[in-house]
Amino acid sequence: MKPNPLFPLLTSLTLAWLPSQAQAMSFGGLTVTPRGAQNLNLETGATDLPSGGTATDTRGGMVLSGAKMQLKPDDSLVAQNATLKTKQGGVLKANNVVYDLKSGTASASGNVSYSDARVKELTAETIVLYVRSGFVVASGGVKASQPDMSGNTLIFDPFTMRSVLTGPFSVNTRYGHPKGALGTKIMLTFGGSSLISANTNPSPDDLARFAPYLK
């Protein structure tokens, strides 16, 4: 029998269709449970989950689900029509979420929205969740219904219950309606689910924890 000359090409390019049973797998510190079949690209090593699935980071407390997913070895997990739940009770939704395995960040784009106990209906061009630190950074056309605010970038620290909003910004609070020009900053402090202060002149010490995210 003559060898099929196409066999090497098929071996390198064809997607291998794996059984559709939902079997959890370990992927870059995440536990990934597919909803259906898995397509393994034998050339790149990437695995497509055409029916989506759920990825859990038990250490960081993140749970990411998507209608479709792609796992790229030693690189990233990409989810479409995704919902991400944080350890602190936040819920992030977006058309696309890319979880970077090396940096431990989840970057969301496309119809992005975020809500937690303090911030409601936050929208922006992009939102990045830093899974290890818990920081949430929303950038570009930031708006929220609670507190009623808008700005360029919002950085939220769930451990100190403080946020920094960069200008141009506008915040409508019971303490007034502060506004700021491009380059200015306002620090918002929460007590439980309520905004308890809005400081339009935060000190360098106040901003120290936010410095890595103020780019």
Image: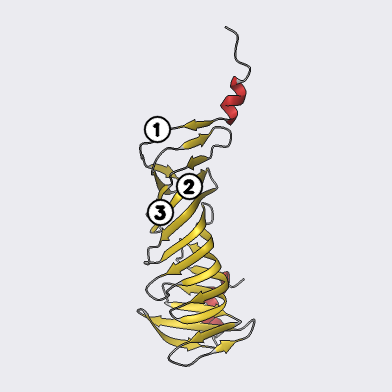
Asked if labels 1 and 2 touch by Cβ distance under 8 angstroms, the answer is no
Mark 2–mark 3 Cα distance, whole angstroms, equals 16 Å
Residue type, mark 1 in image: Pro
Q: Is residue 164 left or right of residue 83?
A: right
Q: Residue at x 42, y 37 (%)?
A: 37
* Residue 17: percent from left, percent from top: 46, 32
Q: Residue at label 3?
A: 57
Mark 2–mark 1 Cα distance, whole angstroms, equals 16 Å
Secondary structure beneath dot 3 equals: strand
Say which quadrant the C terminus sits in: bottom right
Mark 1–mark 3 Cα distance, whole angstroms, equals 24 Å
* Residue 35: percent from left, percent from top: 38, 44
Residue 13: which quarter of the image? top right
- Whether residue 167 is visible to the viewer of this picture, yes or no, is yes
Residue 207: which quarter of the image? bottom right
- 151 or 211: nearer the eye? 151
Of badges 2 and 3, the one in the foreground is 2
Q: Which mark is residue 69?
A: 2
Asked if labels 3 and 1 touch by Cβ distance under 8 angstroms, the answer is no
Going from the N terminus, do you reach mark 1 or mark 3 first?
1
- 67 or 157: nearer the eye? 67
